[in-house]
Amino acid sequence: MAKKSVKNVGVPRTIGIIFAIFLFAVLLIVFNILPLIEQTQQLRDLRESAQQYDRIFTVLQSETQKYQRYHQTLLPFQKDLDTLIEQLKNLGYGFTESGGKFSFKGSMTASHFAWLLENLSMLRGVRVEQMEIRNSFQFPIIVGQAIQPVMEFRSLVIARHQANASLLRR
Amino acid sequence: MVGVNLYKRKKGKLKITTFLLLCIILVLPVAAFRITLYSIREMEVNSIRAESPNASRYMSATQISDLRSASQQLDQQSSIMNQQIRTLQTASRDLERDALYQARIQGALEGFLDVVRSHTESRVYINALSIARGKELRIDFFETASDIEQYKPDSLENALKQRLQRFDVRIARTSSESLFYQGKYIQLNLPLTGM
């Protein structure tokens, strides 16, 4: 009678079960637990970043509106300085411009000076940064005589409010 | 009959198919939990979007699949906005300071001119005028009588003091002696420190 050999093919039960559990544990750690920890942290970061973004965005909006209000308030007076300089140039007084500021040095008649002073006290778009005037005469007027004094400008620097529209376009 | 265990020494084995089936069965919860993780992530992202509507608008424009890069982009954008806030605040502060300074100068000049114009019995001659931002505004002037009968020596001085009171102005008669008939030399000082 021929001997019949039965091959016991398969994985040893204990090793197989241990391996399967080990595989399960590894997969659980690699695909579930580690991503869960990482995802929790990333979601927390995202939440914080989003909240911070919202807070800053609100502040930016409020600051932009504030600046916009200033800008709109000043807008109608933007031409004041140009008009004044133009008028003074027409009267024969030369101004030099540097960095948005206009400077003048020299003599001016008393009537022109009075007119300029009036404008400087009135025009909202013009700001006097510096002014130094001396009367050319130690005693300008002798009572009863019509001597027109000349005002000597040692310095006059006038400027306008610099509301920059480009700041609002960002 | 005697029961003989012929497989007494035989080691228990799992069939390959059984083993593979076992592995597959154990992998299933891992896969299921993985899918749950994705769902939780989506829910959380939606909740963040609902909580922060402004950030949500920015996030929708950017790729959200990578949470880390999404929060990095938000941080970067926040930093850019912070810079813009600082620039706007500086510009607004400068405008406020300029406006306050201008209001002070114009208020003082306007007040001075109004008082001088309304006092027709006096005649004023400006001898020196200086404005230095951050220091002071100073006007030195002579006052003489144009209408001797109506002229009151302290009237103009008092009117100026009253009109320019809110500007903390100092008005002083530096010399009562003058070449002018009933005239005097007056100095007006308006502090502009810190402006």
Image (tube, coloured by chain):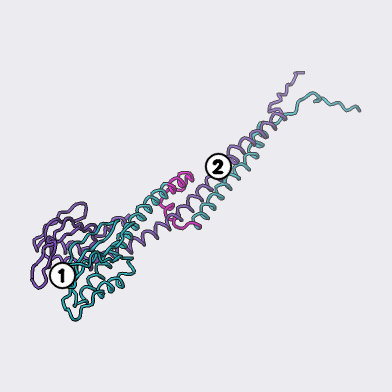
Regarding mark 1 in the picture, which secondary structure is present there?
loop
Same-chain check, marks 2 and 1: no
Residue most extreme to the front: B177
Q: Chain of mark 2?
A: A
Q: Looking at the picture, how far across and down is residue B25, in whole percent?
A: 65, 40
Q: Which residue is mark 2?
A: A38
Residues at discs 2 and 1 in contact (Cβ within 8 Å): no
Residue A44 badge: none
- Cα gap from disc 2 to disc 1, whole angstroms: 92 Å
Residue most extreme to the bottom: B149
Judge by depth and name the residue closer to the eye, B195 or A55. B195
Q: Chain of mark 1?
A: B
Regarding mark 2 in the picture, which secondary structure is present there?
helix
Quadrant assignment, res B92: bottom left
By secondary structure, the bulk of the magenta-drawn segment is best described as: helix
Q: Residues within 10 Å of mark 1 (few under 14, many from 20)?
A: some
In the rendering, what colour is chain B? Answer: cyan
Quadrant assignment, res B129: bottom left
Label 1 amino acid? Phe
Give the extent of the magenta segment: B51-75
Residue visible at 18% across and 55% down?
A155
Judge by depth and name the residue closer to the eye, A113 or B145. B145
Q: Is residue A114 magenta?
A: no
Nearer the camera: disc 2 or disc 1: 1
Q: Residues within 10 Å of mark 2 (few under 14, many from 20)?
A: few
* Image chain in purple: A
Label 2 amino acid? Glu
Residue visible at 21% across and 54% down?
A100
Q: Is residue B71 magenta?
A: yes
Quadrant assignment, res B31: top right
The relative height of residue B1 versus residue A145 in the rendered view (above or below) is above
Residue B180 badge: 1
